[in-house]
Image (spheres, rainbow, N blue to C red):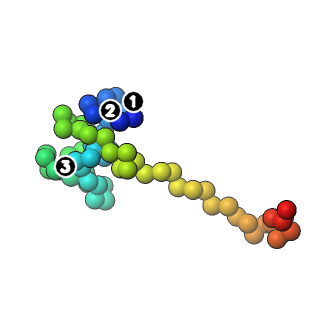
Amino acid sequence: MIFRKKPGENSECRYCKNASMDGGVCTCRYKGEVSPSGVCRRYRFDPFAKRPHRPRNLDTSAFDPLDFEV
């Protein structure tokens, strides 16, 4: 379940609503500085904390403009 409120097997402080990542340091609102892979009883999943994968860059220098016409 993606919006679970209790810690599960994939729960980590870096995805918690109460924590913020500053560089490599994870700071919890309640516990202070914590491990990014840790979890506590105040864990609440934040779907916006997960960063999407970077899009791949397409090298278009090998193509002609005619290749992109319909």
Q: Quadrant of the N terminus?
A: top left
What's the CA distance linking mark 1 and mark 3? Answer: 23 Å
Q: Is residue 36 visible?
A: no
Residue 26: x and y in percent read 25, 51
Between disc 2 and disc 3, the foreground one is 2
Q: Is residue 61 visible?
A: yes
Location of mark 3 (residue)? 28
Image quadrant where residue 2 sits? top left
Residue 39: x and y in percent read 24, 37
Name which of mark 2 and mark 3 comes first in the sequence.
2
What's the CA distance linking mark 2 and mark 3? Answer: 19 Å
Q: Which residue is located at x 31 percent, y 40 percent?
A: 45
Asked if disc 2 and disc 1 are in contact, CB closer than 8 Å, the reply is yes
Task: Report the side of 57 relative to 3 (left or right).
Answer: right
Q: Which residue is located at x 85 percent, y 62 percent?
A: 70
Q: Which residue is located at x 13 percent, y 46 percent?
A: 30
Asked if disc 1 and disc 3 are in contact, CB closer than 8 Å, the reply is no
- Residue at disc 1, secondary structure: loop
Relative vertical location of residue 61 with respect to residue 12 in this rendering, above or below: below
Residue 1 — which label? 1
Location of mark 2 (residue)? 4
